[in-house]
Every structure is written in C-alpha cells, then in structure tokens.
C-alpha cells in the first residue's frame, strides 16, 4: 500500500467497522472476518478511481467511474465480500466489474475470480489496472452477466454488483451446491434489498434479505 494513503485507509476501516456494528440487526454480522479486513488493506482503492477523485478514494461512499457507473461504497464491498465467505480454494464469479475493485478484493481471498462487465471500455480499463497491480488470478470478460459465465461454472460464490428485479436463473444454475450468492434485488435506483442466497448440498435454494441498498441497474437480460 502507498504510504500516503495509509492513514486514510485505516480511518476508512474504522468507519466500516462502526457501520458493521450499526447495521448488525439487519445483516446478522457485527464484524468483518479478519481476512476480509486484510484484503481491504491490500487493495489500493485510489488506483481504482478516476485521477481527479483520488482525494476521495478512501471516503466511505460510492464514486463515479464514467459511463454513468460507480465504484460501490467501501462498506458495501466489505459486507458483500464477507457474506459470500470466499475461501482459498474457491472459484468466484462477479457480475459488474466496473472499476475492478470488488474483483481485486475477492481475488485476495479466493483461488480465481471471473468477472463480467457489459461496458467494453470499463472492462478494458479494469483489465489493464488489475494486470498492472499483479492480480494474475482474475479474468475479465465483456458480456451480459444475466447469463453468467458457463465455461467456468459451477462457482463457489457469485457476487452481483448491479441491481435486478429478479435473480437471473442462469446465476442460480451456475452456483455450486454449498455455494453463496449475494445480489441487490429491486427496481432501478430505489427500494432495493441486498439478498444472500445459499444453495445447500441437495441444490435447495435458501434466500434472506440482508440490507436496504442502492445500486446501478443490471442492464440487458433476455430480450
Ligand atoms: N463492482 C464494481 C462496481 C460495479 S457498478 C467495482 O468494484 O467498481 C455496476 C457495474 O455493472 C457497472 O460497471 C455496469 O456497467 C455493470 N453492468 C450493468 N449491467 C450489467 C450486465 N448485464 N452484465 C455485466 N455487467 C453489467
């Protein structure tokens, strides 16, 4: 980590810890797994935001990244990462690469991360940035995440970072038995709920609401 940002990062981690406490009645999690905190320490968030916003990179709110898209609020990235409990041997799918930040955090914890982005320019920027930072266990593809990435399925964990009125069936199909999926569900820009979905060993789906959230919409989908 670039030392100029060390203090800001530690202040951000303290804010995230406080927000975890404040929201535990919703999320059921009072604190982050220590490994998630370490992953947040390892990924230089200022590299994932536009140059003119670097001064705000460690503020606990979303920031614009171009094309009308945002890099999610750090607390939300931390919570989503924590909820899917990525383990060292896991293969993870992310839908909505955006800046690549969430993918980088996941890649610190899992064996491999596949991430899909529908805006080709964002995918290209993220790919270059992740390569520059040495994340050689992340693959970025341009495509519509509604259909998942069948070639590498099934996934131990799936993280969707754009909101949809209903969970795309292909993503449920591509989740491994015992796997976890986290996704914001709801209409564009309001009344969305972060949901945690678990598939048990027999393939049964159990779902629970975690937190009210606001994400950009998952666009595309079946015609
Ligand atoms: N995870 C990102 C933030 C994502 S913002 C980060 O860490 O920076 C949501 C992203 O989802 C946007 O970049 C948007 O272009 C993308 N997106 C929207 N619909 C999509 C779809 N159907 N498939 C893949 N990506 C999509």
Image (cartoon, rainbow, N blue to C red):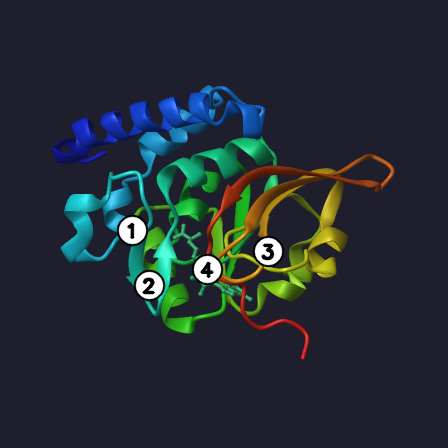
- Tell me what residue is drawn at x 38 percent, y 59 percent: 127
Q: Which residue is mark 3?
A: 186
Q: Depth check: 133 or 6 in front? A: 6
Q: Can you say whether 153 is above or below 77 in the image?
A: below
Mark with earlier residue (4, 3) = 3
Q: Which residue is mark 2?
A: 125
Quadrant in which residue 167 is drawn: bottom right
Q: Mark 1 or mark 3: which is in front?
A: 3
* Helix, strand or loop status at disc 1: helix
**Can residue 109 be seen?**
no
Residues at marks 4 and 2, CA–CA distance in whole angstroms: 19 Å
Position of residue 13 measured from the top left corner of the image (x, y, whole percent): 32, 27
Disc 4 to disc 3: CB gap under 8 Å: no
Quarter the N terminus occupies = top left
Position of residue 171 measured from the top left corner of the image (x, y, whole percent): 69, 55
Mark with earlier residue (1, 3) = 1
Q: Can you say whether 71 is above or below 180 in the image?
A: below
Disc 1 to disc 3: CB gap under 8 Å: no
Disc 1 to disc 2: CB gap under 8 Å: no
Q: Which residue is mark 1?
A: 48
Q: Is mark 4 within 8 Å of ligand 1?
A: yes
Residues at marks 1 and 2, CA–CA distance in whole angstroms: 9 Å
Q: Mark 1 or mark 2: which is in front?
A: 1
Mark with earlier residue (1, 2) = 1
Q: Which residue is mark 4?
A: 216
Disc 4 to disc 1: CB gap under 8 Å: no
Q: Is mark 1 within 8 Å of ligand 1?
A: yes
* Helix, strand or loop status at disc 2: helix
- Tell me what residue is drawn at x 47 percent, y 59 percent: 189
How many residues crowd around disc 4 within 10 Å: few (fewer than 14), some, or many (20 or more)? some
Mark with earlier residue (3, 2) = 2
């Amino acid at each position: 980590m670039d030392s100029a940002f060390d203090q800001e990062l530690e202040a951000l981690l303290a804010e995230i810890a406080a927000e975890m406490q404040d929201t535990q009645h919703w999320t059921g999690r009072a604190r982050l797994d220590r490994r998630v905190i370490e992953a947040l320490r390892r990924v230089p968030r200022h590299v994932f935001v536009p140059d003119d916003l670097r001064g705000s990179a460690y503020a606990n709110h979303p920031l614009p990244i171009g094309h009308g898209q945002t890099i999610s609020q750090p607390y939300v990235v931390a919570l989503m990462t924590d909820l899917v409990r990525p383990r060292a041997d896991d293969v993870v799918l992310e839908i909505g690469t955006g800046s690549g930040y969430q993918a980088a955090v996941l890649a610190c914890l899992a064996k491999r991360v596949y991430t899909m982005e529908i805006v080709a320019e964002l995918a290209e920027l993220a790919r270059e940035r992740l390569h520059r930072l040495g994340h050689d266990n992340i693959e970025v593809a341009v495509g519509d995440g509604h259909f998942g990435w069948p070639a590498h399925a099934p996934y131990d964990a799936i993280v969707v970072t754009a909101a949809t009125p209903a969970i795309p069936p292909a993503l449920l199909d591509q989740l491994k038995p015992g796997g976890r999926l986290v996704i914001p569900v709801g209409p564009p820009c309001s009344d969305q709920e972060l949901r945690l979905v678990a598939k048990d060993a027999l393939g049964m789906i159990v779902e629970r609401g975690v937190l009210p959230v606001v994400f950009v919409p998952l666009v595309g989908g079946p015609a």
